[in-house]
Image (spheres, coloured by chain):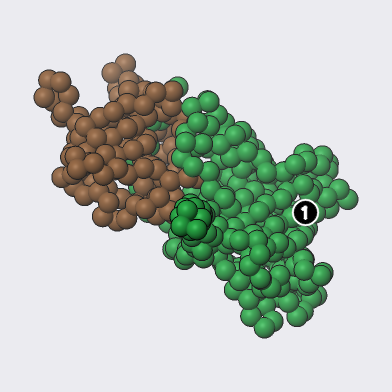
Amino acid sequence: MKSIRFLASIVVLAAAPAILMTLIPGRANGQSQEAEQVPFDPHDLSGVWWVDQPGPDVIFARAKNGDAGKCQTCHPSEHAVPEPPLTAWARENLVFAGDRFHGTLEKPAGSAFPSAISKRNNCDPIAVPAQFWYTQLYPFEFVVTADRILQFFEKQNEWRVIWMKRGHPKDVQPTYMGDSVGKWEGDTLVVDTTGYNGKDLIEPAGVDHLMSDSFHLLERWRRTSSGKMDLEVTYYDPKVWGDKPWGGLKKQFLLQRNLQLMEAFCTAEDNARFDEFVKPLLPPPGK
Amino acid sequence: MNRVLAILGAVLMGLIWASAPAFAHHGYAAYDMTQTVTLKGTITSYLLSNPHSTITFDVKDDKGKVQHWSAEFGYLRQMKAAGWTSTSLKPGDDVTMELNVAKNGSYVATLRRVAFPDGRVLRMGGGGE
């Protein structure tokens, strides 16, 4: 009997760490330890959310592989399908940024508008869908109220309203963020955004042109467990892609129970300070 | 006349370079990412910020001459997630750093790791802009 009790106590002691791990809250850097059996309301998207973060070794390994500057893998395209072909109008009229996220600083020849890099350095609005790309770097927060859902993006301190009890106004004022309306289809929040002013980058890397003012964004948000939420995004832009949508963009977010959004304004002062830092890295004139 | 033209040309090139478009996001292409260099130095400035955090530090070469270095590392959210604070480093700290240095030989680097004499270590976080 004593030996049985002794063996039982050994088993309990051995299992204790595993038991304790299920009770420890998720770490603030994105590794939520949510147990799948924790009950949740799929219509409550409130909280701070962030994609799973790669460790620094992953980032440096990518850079070591020579992808730094090309950004094919340090910021890989998140679309599972290629961009649809451009319309003739788009080829003639769209603003082509011509540069990658970390690429050339030159304004494209003939471009009447700033390049993608200059838009970022000017601290131009990011808006959606480009903010979804930044969620690999910065978290966001949903706040749910009676008639709207507020989405706060840490990157550049931007926010938007998803109106839940109205449709798009007939005479919507075009804006950088557009007008977003949402409705539930079962446990999926479907968000429809129109009313863009055509001045946004669609994504900060991988899409080298702006949207047109006919851009239309469709999002499908689904909280799949207490600590996970999926997003599926489809772009429509009749002036740019005709009747072809551009989908294949999926992301998954982890609930960050111990994270608060930080201030992350873009300022000319911060950009100028860093410009001074990197000046020694620039090639000398003429090269 | 030739001297005047040469001076004007130099001034013009300087103006062109000084007015180069902003370079606030640049990736790792400027650094030798194939090997890590270890330097011992004294911190002279430290700033957690966006788009990148920075430190400056002095390193004595083997002849006793002081080299003035600067290094960049993660954006604010990334470093907070890795446990850094506004006081993780301060001027006067003597530390050992692992870095990837600039390919062009300038005293500029990207920071990988900081070790203190008492054994504490500061590492980078995940993500990267």
- A36 relative to B109 in the view: left or right: right
> What hue does chain B carry in this figure?
brown
The residue positioned 78% from the left and 72% from the top of the image is: A183
- Identify the residue at the far left of this view: B64
Considering every residue shown, the one lying at the far right of the view is A243
Q: Quadrant of residue B123?
A: top left
- Residue highlighted by disc 1: A234
Q: The green chain is which one?
A: A
Q: Residue at x 39, y 54 (%)?
A: B80
Q: Where is residue B50 in the image (x, y as percent from the top left)?
A: 41, 51
The image position of residue B129, as x and y in percent, is 49, 44
| Residue A94 visible | yes
In the foreground, B122 or A199? B122
Vertically, is B60 above or below A173?
A: above
* Residue drawn at x 34%, y 32% as measured from the top left: B99
- Quadrant hosting residue B64: top left
In what quadrant of the picture does the C terminus of chain A appear?
Answer: top left
Amino acid type at circle 1 is: Thr
